Image (spheres, helix red, strand yellow):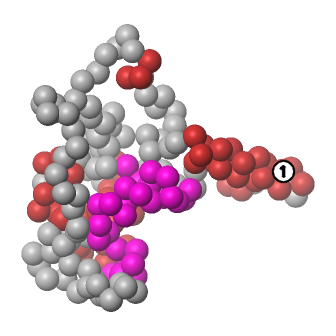
Amino acid sequence: MTSCSIPSSLSCWPTLVTRCWISLTSKASVTFLARLLSKNQSKERKYRENFRWLQEEYERMNEEDPMSAPYHYGCHYSNSGTVLHFLVRLPPFTKMFLQYQDRSFDIPDRTFHSMATTWRLSSFESATDVKELIPEFFFLPEFLENTEGFDFGVRQNGQRVMDVEVLSGPKAAPDCSC
């Protein structure tokens, strides 16, 4: 699945869906692409509850502005902010990120610093974080390293943000040849 065929703009950055195997006859292999890939039942309930609340408010206020209509997700799973969030360590994306953020890096605790934290937030812990992996996760590990020595600051726990903390070893099946 891609959001467009060529990433000529940050708003058209492709997203990547991959599996080691797929069976077109198995329901377990079917992905309902009308929903985010990172959603789970708990998050889906929260999105539905939020939508119902927004719908009630919209009707109560007699709003006719389509921009204030109720919605399920507050942002798209792959947008320029998401792409720059992940690629901030890699020029020329660093410069684009700084332009996007009014010439400064983000708050250190919000800076992409850990694969485990990012997975936890987008998978189940945060109802507002709907980021999906971008293709660079699968072919460009250099984007995880702060080779330019950018000063991303110090997190509240006292740790300086430098390279992204990666997960230790794949948990895929040994015969997986993705």
153 to the left or right of 35: left
Look at 26% across and 85% down and name the residue there: 160
Q: Where does the image place residue 168, in percent across and percent down from the top left?
A: 19, 57
Q: Is residue 104 at all visible to an observer of this figure?
A: no
Determine whether 144 is above or below 102 in the image: above
Determine whether 62 is above or below 150 in the image: above
Look at 51% across and 33% down and name the residue there: 34
Look at 70% across and 52% down and name the residue there: 50
Residue 29 in the magenta stretch? The answer is no
Q: Quadrant of the N terminus?
A: top left
Q: Where does the image place residue 83, in percent across and percent down from the top left?
A: 32, 59
Q: Quadrant of the C terminus?
A: top left
- In the image, farthest residue toward the top: 25
What is the count of numbered marks?
A: 1
Q: Which sits in the foreground, 178 or 132?
A: 178
Q: Where does the image place residue 125, in percent across and percent down from the top left?
A: 51, 58
Amino acid carrying mark 1 in the image = Glu
18 to the left or right of 138: right
88 to the left or right of 33: left
Which image quarter: residue 153?
bottom left
109 to the left or right of 171: right
Residue 121 in the magenta stretch? The answer is yes
Q: Is residue 75 at all visible to an observer of this figure?
A: yes
Which image quarter: residue 103?
bottom left
Look at 26% across and 31% down and name the residue there: 19
Determine whether 11 is above or below 157 in the image: above
Identify the magenta region.
104-132
- For label 1, the SS is helix
- Which residue is under mark 1? 56
Q: Where does the image place residue 97, in percent across and percent down from the top left?
A: 31, 72
Which image quarter: residue 5?
top left
